[in-house]
Image (cartoon, rainbow, N blue to C red):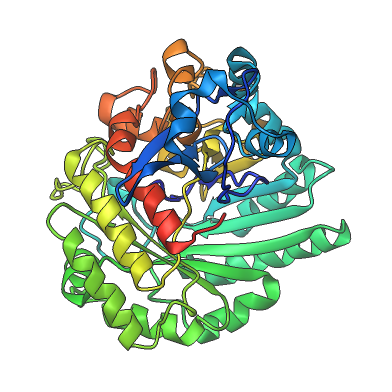
């Protein structure tokens, strides 16, 4: 899967994966990168696929090259290409040092400020597995808090920022449409006055995402909306009904059809062990309904995860607690294949950096409390500040260097993991100490995911 969730970012390396035909040998002075996976080709026994977890690059090479690496040499051009793509290094210890500084370098180069802003914790749906769970209620951001949020962003956005991105979240953010327009209007004016780009997005259940609402928000920078459909109508309506009990599927599909040519629409869905095999029926339905791949920017499905006691809904226990459960491994590959073969776009395999590791990425609750992950919202012990007082040091409280240990540094999957999801670690184990290791999942799925990238020509 390796797919985006709120608070999780894909790191797109400027070096793009490409096929390289090699007829000569590897140089004696060069070493194969530690962060390289080698996969045999079932239809070509004489070739191998190499995949760089560091650069997300893919090459096809003759099998004998990897078998006798130390004895052979390349032309300077081939050597340079393989180095750039991340397959060859001169010194594995130096490569380890580079990985240790990867996140710091990323932060230094980043010229974008991002905030996930929770407008309210209210909702017009009664989802069975609701991520907010018992935190939900009629809690709304006030105009005073909105003004302070704008001031906070004005005071804290670095001078070299070229883009400000705000994702409005909830609850259901479109229950606060007026305040979204108010905040976006102020931030858009601020950005334009500083020669900065401003764009806004929504994470919404889609029931209120009408053309009229989009027409209202587009002048204030609305560029995209992420909408949830949990499978075909029969499955979705079971898990995501209106509070009245009526299904929400038809209203959401109608709204997506109405706005997909006005803003970029991303489609997400949450599956369980019992229903993930029905999700391809959703994609077929969307195609028949006119929501063809050219109308949807991206499709990604995720397993439903359990929450901690005191947060999770009282009557839902069908989620999972780790990505390493065998059925999730099967479901991730299956759903990605079904999505791609129908022509819908989904994310390429790339290094993934947690929002907690990004200096210029925050989540702001409706009351102004600041967090480093939307999953932590409402957990007071993981607040990192307030828009009135600023951000405190959270390095130790959020276990930022959990992956800086010999076991992780020696793992070929490190760039695809960097210690895993601290939020899931907290939910599962009651603490964020240690890592949320994804090795079992990647051992079981990465080859298939790489082959899908090759088969469908996915590019970063």
Query: Quadrant of the image for the C terminus?
Result: bottom right
Horizontal and vertical percent position of residue 134: 28, 47
Q: Is residue 394 visible?
A: no
Residue visible at 35% across and 73% down in the picture = 342
- In the picture shown, does residue 338 fall above or below 234? above
Residue 76 located left or right of residue 245: right
Horizontal and vertical percent position of residue 368: 57, 44
Q: How many numbered callouts?
A: 0
Residue 410 located left or right of residue 87: left
Among the 4 quarters of the image, the one containing residue 301: bottom left
Horizontal and vertical percent position of residue 250: 29, 83
Viewer-proximal residue, 107 or 376? 107
Residue 237 located left or right of residue 361: left
Residue visible at 24% across and 57% down in the picture = 271
Among the 4 quarters of the image, the one containing residue 263: bottom right
Viewer-proximal residue, 164 or 281? 281
Residue visible at 44% across and 77% down in the picture = 293
Among the 4 quarters of the image, the one containing residue 358: top right
Residue visible at 38% across and 51% down in the picture = 451
Q: Is residue 182 visible?
A: yes
Horizontal and vertical percent position of residue 202: 52, 64
Viewer-proximal residue, 150 or 459? 459
- In the picture shown, does residue 74 fall above or below 280? above
Viewer-proximal residue, 62 or 417? 62
């Amino acid at each position: 899967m390796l797919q985006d969730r709120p608070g999780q970012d894909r790191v797109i390396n400027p070096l793009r994966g490409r096929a390289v035909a090699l007829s000569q040998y590897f140089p004696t002075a060069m070493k194969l990168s530690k962060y390289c996976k080698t996969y045999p080709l079932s239809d070509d026994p004489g070739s191998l696929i190499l995949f760089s977890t560091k650069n997300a690059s893919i090459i096809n090479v003759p099998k004998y090259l990897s078998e006798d690496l130390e004895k052979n040499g390349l032309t300077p051009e081939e050597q340079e290409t393989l180095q750039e793509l991340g397959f060859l290094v001169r010194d594995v210890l130096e490569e380890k040092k580079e990985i240790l500084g990867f996140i710091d370098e990323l932060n230094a180069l980043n010229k974008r400020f991002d905030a996930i802003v929770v407008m309210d914790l209210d909702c017009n749906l009664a989802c069975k597995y609701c991520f907010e769970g018992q935190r939900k209620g009629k809690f709304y951001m006030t105009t005073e808090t909105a003004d302070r949020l704008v001031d906070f962003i004005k005071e804290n956005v670095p001078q070299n920022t070229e883009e400000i991105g705000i994702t409005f979240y909830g609850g259901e953010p479109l229950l606060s449409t007026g305040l979204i327009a108010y905040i976006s209007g102020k931030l858009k004016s601020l950005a334009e006055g500083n020669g900065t780009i401003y764009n806004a997005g929504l994470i919404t259940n889609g029931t209120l995402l009408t053309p009229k609402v989009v027409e209202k928000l587009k002048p204030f920078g609305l560029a995209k909306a992420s909408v949830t459909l949990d499978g075909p109508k029969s499955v979705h309506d079971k898990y995501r009904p209106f509070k009245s009990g009526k299904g929400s599927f038809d209203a959401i599909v109608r709204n997506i059809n109405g706005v997909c040519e006005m803003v970029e629409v991303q489609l997400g869905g949450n599956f369980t062990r019992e229903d993930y095999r029905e999700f391809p029926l959703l994609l077929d339905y969307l195609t028949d309904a006119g929501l063809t791949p050219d109308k949807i920017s991206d499709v990604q499905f995720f397993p439903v995860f359990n929450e901690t006691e005191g947060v999770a809904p009282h009557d839902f226990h069908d989620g999972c607690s780790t990505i390493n459960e065998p059925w999730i491994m099967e479901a991730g590959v299956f759903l990605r294949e079904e999505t791609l073969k129908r022509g819908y776009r989904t994310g390429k395999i790339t290094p993934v950096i947690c929002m907690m590791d990004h200096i210029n990425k925050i989540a702001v609750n409706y009351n102004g409390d600041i967090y480093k992950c939307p999953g932590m919202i409402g957990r007071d012990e993981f607040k990192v500040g307030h828009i009135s007082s600023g951000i405190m040091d959270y390095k130790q409280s959020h276990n930022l260097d959990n992956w800086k240990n010999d076991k992780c540094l020696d793992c070929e999957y490190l760039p695809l993991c960097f210690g895993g999801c601290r939020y899931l670690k907290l939910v599962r184990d009651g603490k964020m100490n240690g890592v949320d290791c994804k090795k079992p999942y990647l051992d079981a799925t990465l080859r298939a995911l790489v082959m899908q990238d090759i088969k469908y020509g996915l590019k970063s």
